[in-house]
């Protein structure tokens, strides 16, 4: 009977360790997703700034350097969205990621128009489009990314057991 009790204690301990490990893995995955999302926010802010700088660039060399930075930032957010999509298992998460992709697509089309005008020496048109549309696009992408972050932090969690307190006696 002592052997059976030891076996039960061992099984319960093993189960508890598995639960702790699974919880730690869940936390690590959520942390990775949040870091990727924040990295996308940063990359998009940098694209926004570089696009504005492009409207004021005077030389082809300046414009080329700015284009290179924009491409690097685009690579950052594309890699992040690819990883997020690959690791997303919930339907809500997938829908939110699709919303981010749609906002990015809309933003890229405006960015491409501003870039084309800036490259053609039409700085006034580029700046006007950037000022009229850039803020709206940034607001939409930021809102889509924030909704995804909210989804990550508001996901249902397993209820935690309340600590027992000794009763006064």
Image (tube, rainbow, N blue to C red):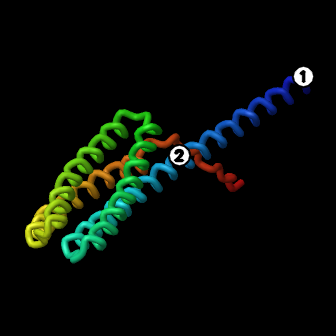
Label 2 environment density (alpha carbons within 10 Å; few <14, some 14–19, many ≥20): few
Depth order, front residue of 83/115: 115
The quarter of the image holding the N terminus is top right
In the structure shown, which secondary structural element does the residue marked by tag 2 occupy? Answer: helix
Depth order, front residue of 8/44: 44
How many numbered marks are there?
2
Q: Which mark is residue 29?
A: 2
12 sits to left or right of 37: right
Query: How far across and how far down the image is residue 128, in percent?
Result: 9, 69
Residue 22 visible at all: yes
The quarter of the image holding the C terminus is bottom right
31 sits to left or right of 74: right
6 sits to left or right of 145: right
Asked where in the image residue 7 lies, by quadrant, the reply is: top right
In the structure shown, which secondary structural element does the residue marked by tag 1 occupy? Answer: loop
- If you read the primary sequence from the N terminus, does the residue marked by circle 1 or circle 2 appear first? 1
Residue denoted by label 1: 1
Give the residue drawn at x 70%, y 33%.
Answer: 15
Query: How far across and how far down the image is residue 62, in percent?
Result: 29, 73
- Extreme residue in the front direction: 60
Give the residue drawn at x 42%, y 58%.
Answer: 39
């Amino acid at each position: 009977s002592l052997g059976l009790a030891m076996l039960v204690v061992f099984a319960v301990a093993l189960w508890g360790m598995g639960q702790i490990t699974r919880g730690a893995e869940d936390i690590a995955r959520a942390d990775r997703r949040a870091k990727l999302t924040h990295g996308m926010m940063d990359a998009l802010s940098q694209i926004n700034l570089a696009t504005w700088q492009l409207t004021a660039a005077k030389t082809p060399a300046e414009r080329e350097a700015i284009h290179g930075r924009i491409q690097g930032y685009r690579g950052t957010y594309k890699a992040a969205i690819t990883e997020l999509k690959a690791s997303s298992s919930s339907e809500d998460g997938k829908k939110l990621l699709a919303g981010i992709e749609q906002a990015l697509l809309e933003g890229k089309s405006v960015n491409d128009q501003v870039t084309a005008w800036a490259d053609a020496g039409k700085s006034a048109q580029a700046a006007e489009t950037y000022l009229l549309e850039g803020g709206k696009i940034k607001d939409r992408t930021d809102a889509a990314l924030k909704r995804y972050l909210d989804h990550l932090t508001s996901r249902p969690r397993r209820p935690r057991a309340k600590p027992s307190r000794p009763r006064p006696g």
